[in-house]
């Protein structure tokens, strides 16, 4: 008799951002004359850098000529892209990463979700709380989460609270864990992690035989003296997998390109995780389009770097406007310095969804309820800096007027 994967049935009916989109759609339908400003989902608004567009146009022309046409490419990415990644993202920071340790993909969301394929379903998972929902939901799908207990979370997942009291940095688990998800600069809180603090996690993972799944999708937004890569920390190559993305860095949210780094030194029970991931990727995907990879390569050109840096500066200025406005109004706000996210403590005892409804109804502003990121996110709210400068300023004024 045919059966389904019952773990999927344990999940909430819809993904967090799908639920937000549904609510906003209903509001717009009933208020057709109201302008809605979106500071919720982390989707960029500035166009792709000219250098990227030019590179993609040239690659498109190549695909139209028999002499330069390309069919299936290397599943793990063209060497030209992996080479500039190794040189610019790692070598310039004193880190040596081999080309065959870099795997090009269509997004960090895909990779952080799919990485579980190479790990046993009985492994114990630890996540920050609040946390990017993909880390949790994909482990529910894989059967590692157990059962959902109201007010406590998933029975087999180890939650590491990130609260105002601990500076939104997780504490080392007090029980044995196997897979540790860390994201810094953090989504959703916007807080970053220092070298010494990150070294604690690397030492812990090596000592306990755990693997760190390190999501560095927002490293390009770092403005202070902080690690951009976990491999800047001694010992990380034997315990950590790193995920990177061009989505927020270079506006590739709709273009789709990212990469994952798995050092060959990283082995579990004598088995190379690099080889396992290579086998997984070569079986389940045919690689990222040549045109897109040429666009990603252009991110590292002189003009591409200049344009990307300007876009990041633009979004960080928006974050400064958001955080500054909220703080002047007496509200507690965090993040926004090394990331595009501002983490706001909801006022007047409102819970996260109540505050969401208030902002939508009174201000016409969309954010993300903190409770959607986990139990420790209750009473908080995430705003993003990815809208235009004008809309960001307008949204802040509306928010302050509605309180």
Image: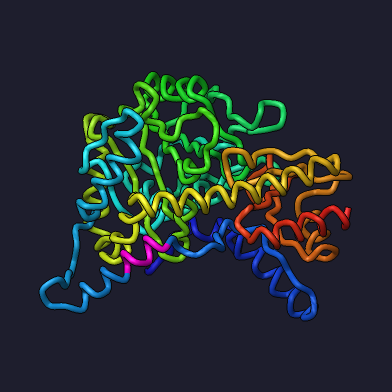
The structure residue drawn at horizontal position 48% and vertical position 23%, both measured from the top left corner, is 195
Judge by depth and name the residue closer to the eye, 247 or 92. 92
Q: Quadrant of residue 65?
A: bottom left
The question of residue 27 being in magenta is answered with: no
Q: Which residues are magenta?
A: 50-56
**Rendered position, 366 above or below 144:** below
Q: Position of residue 150 (x, y in %)?
A: 69, 46
Q: Position of residue 133 (x, y in %)?
A: 56, 50
The structure residue drawn at horizontal position 75% and vertical position 43%, both measured from the top left corner, is 324
How many marks overall? 0
Q: Majority secondary structure of the magenta segment?
A: helix
244 lies left or right of 134: left
The structure residue drawn at horizontal position 70% and vertical position 61%, both measured from the top left corner, is 390
**Quadrant of the snapshot with the N terminus:** bottom left
**Rendered position, 12 above or below 380:** below
**Rendered position, 49 above or below 242:** below
The question of residue 54 being in magenta is answered with: yes
Q: Position of residue 170 (x, y in %)?
A: 58, 29
The structure residue drawn at horizontal position 25% and vertical position 48%, both measured from the top left corner, is 82
Judge by depth and name the residue closer to the eye, 158 or 372. 372
Q: Position of residue 45 (x, y in %)?
A: 56, 63
């Amino acid at each position: 008799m045919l059966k389904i994967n019952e773990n999927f049935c344990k999940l909430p009916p819809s993904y967090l951002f799908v639920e937000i989109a549904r609510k906003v759609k209903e509001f717009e339908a009933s208020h057709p004359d109201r302008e809605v400003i979106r500071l919720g989902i982390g989707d960029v608004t500035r166009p792709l850098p000219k250098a990227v567009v030019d590179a993609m146009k040239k690659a498109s022309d190549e695909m139209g000529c028999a002499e330069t046409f390309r069919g299936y490419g290397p599943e793990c990415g063209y060497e030209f892209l992996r080479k500039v990644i190794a040189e610019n993202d790692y070598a310039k920071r004193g880190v040596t990463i081999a080309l065959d340790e870099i795997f090009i993909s269509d997004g960090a969301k895909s990779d952080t979700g799919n990485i579980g394929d190479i790990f046993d379903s009985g492994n114990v998972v630890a996540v920050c709380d609040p946390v990017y929902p993909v880390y949790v939901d994909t482990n529910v799908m894989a059967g590692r989460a157990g059962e959902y207990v109201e007010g406590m979370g998933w029975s087999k997942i180890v939650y590491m609270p990130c609260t105002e009291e601990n500076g939104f940095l997780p504490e080392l688990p007090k029980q044995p864990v196997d897979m540790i998800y860390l994201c810094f600069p953090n989504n959703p809180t916007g807080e970053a992690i220092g070298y010494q603090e990150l070294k604690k996690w690397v030492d812990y993972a090596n000592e306990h035989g755990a693997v760190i799944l390190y999501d560095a999708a927002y490293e390009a937004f770092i403005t202070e003296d902080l690690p951009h890569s976990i491999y800047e920390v001694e010992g990380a190559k034997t315990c950590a997998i790193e995920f990177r993305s061009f989505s927020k860095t270079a506006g590739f949210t709709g273009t789709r390109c990212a990469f994952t780094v798995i050092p060959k030194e990283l082995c579990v029970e004598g088995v190379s995780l690099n080889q396992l991931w290579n086998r997984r990727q070569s079986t389940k995907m045919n690689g990222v389009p040549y045109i897109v990879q040429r666009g990603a390569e252009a991110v590292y050109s002189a003009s591409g770097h200049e344009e990307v840096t300007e876009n990041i500066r633009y979004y960080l200025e928006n974050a400064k406007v958001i955080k500054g406005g909220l703080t002047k109004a007496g509200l507690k706000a965090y993040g926004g310095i090394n990331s595009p996210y501002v983490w706001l403590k909801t006022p007047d005892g409102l819970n996260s969804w109540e505050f969401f409804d208030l902002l939508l109804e009174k201000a016409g502003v969309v954010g993300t309820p903190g409770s959607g990121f986990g139990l420790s996110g209750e009473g908080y709210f995430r705003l993003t800096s990815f809208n235009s400068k004008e809309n960001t300023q307008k949204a802040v004024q509306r928010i302050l007027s509605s309180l």
